[in-house]
Image (cartoon, rainbow, N blue to C red):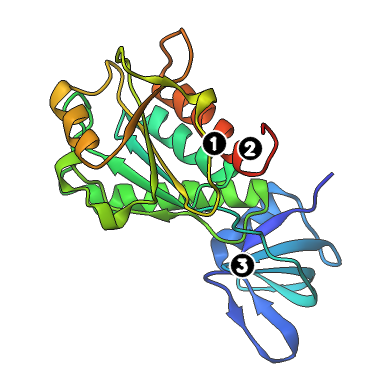
Amino acid sequence: MSLPRARLDDAQRLSGGIWILSKDESHHLVHVRRCRIGDEFEGLLEGCKLMLVIKGYEDGRVIAEETKRLPPSEMKMRTVLLTALVKSGTFEDILNHATELGVTEIVPILAERCVVRVDDRLPAKMARWKRIIEEATKVSGIDRPPLLHRPLRPMDLREDMLPSLRLIGALTDDARPLGGMRIDAEGGVAFAVGPEGDWTKEEISLFLRLNFIPVSLGPNILRANTAAVAGLSYIILSAEGGLS
């Protein structure tokens, strides 16, 4: 069984390797993971993993001592997921699974067929999405959360934002089987997943102008979250040599 994990991004670091965790992370360790004084846990900080032991509590915050540094997560390939801003539960599921799989960036796309619209609640939504991503890093032990971009329209995408290989899941006759694509880990990959009902013809044209290659994920029509997981899994495993 893996050790409990906590984010240290908002923790206070004192001299002598002492850390005072945030109240949210302290609550997670004590009330969710049932940790007690003397228990060990992993601390996750961007580019860094630590082993810590709980020494006490103060004003609802865990006080822990750093015992050793662990090897950080390896970032083997830049993987950018461009996902249509689908309904909240499905979108949050995509955030969760994409983070666990190890994507480096997530770009919500305001597709024409999306039912979700961005309004003055966007800051609150972005904060919630970032919390979901951080929770997923604790499940998978990833120290560096993927960069979450603000939602963009397809017409707002630029070449300099994207890796060299660009793939888009599409229900078009010219889509190539994803399994036949050669994945180059050094150049990175962008993978775009559309909403229920797929992209419009105009949106496909915009992606094609940015040199996206339409790919098929099999003979069946998939939900957005299933398509994201299936496509990313193949891309990341192929880059690691697992499917080559």
Local crowd at mark 1 within 10 Å, few (<14), some, or many (≥20)?
many
Please tell me which residue is depicted at 67% across the width and 33% down the height of the picture: 244
Residue in the foreground of this view, choosing between 173 and 154: 173
Local crowd at mark 3 within 10 Å, few (<14), some, or many (≥20)?
few
Residue in the foreground of this view, choosing between 122 and 75: 75
Instruction: Give the numbered dot on residue 237.
Output: 2
Instruction: Give x and y (percent) for residue 55.
Output: 79, 74
Instruction: Give the numbered dot on residue 235.
Output: 1
Instruction: Give the numbered dot on residue 171.
Output: none
Please tell me which residue is depicted at 23% across the width and 34% down the height of the picture: 208
Q: Amino acid at mark 2?
A: Leu
> Could you tell me if the residues under marks 1 and 2 are in contact, i.e. CB atoms within 8 Å?
yes
Single out the mark in the foreground, 3 or 1.
1
For the N terminus, the image quarter is top right
Q: Amino acid at mark 3?
A: Gly
Residue located beneath label 3 in the image = 60
Residue 198 sits above or below residue 119 on the image: above
In screen coordinates, is 44 left or right of 212? right
Q: Earlier in the sequence, mark 3 or mark 1?
A: 3
Q: Amino acid at mark 1?
A: Ile
The single residue placed furthest to the top in the displayed view is 219
Please tell me which residue is depicted at 48% across the width and 25% down the height of the picture: 178
Alpha carbon separation for disc pair 3 and 1: 43 Å
Instruction: Give x and y (percent) for residue 123.
Output: 26, 54
Please tell me which residue is depicted at 22% across the width and 27% down the height of the picture: 114
Q: Secondary structure at mark 3?
A: loop
Image-quadrant location for residue 160: bottom left
Q: Secondary structure at mark 1?
A: helix
Image-quadrant location for residue 83: top left
Local crowd at mark 2 within 10 Å, few (<14), some, or many (≥20)?
some
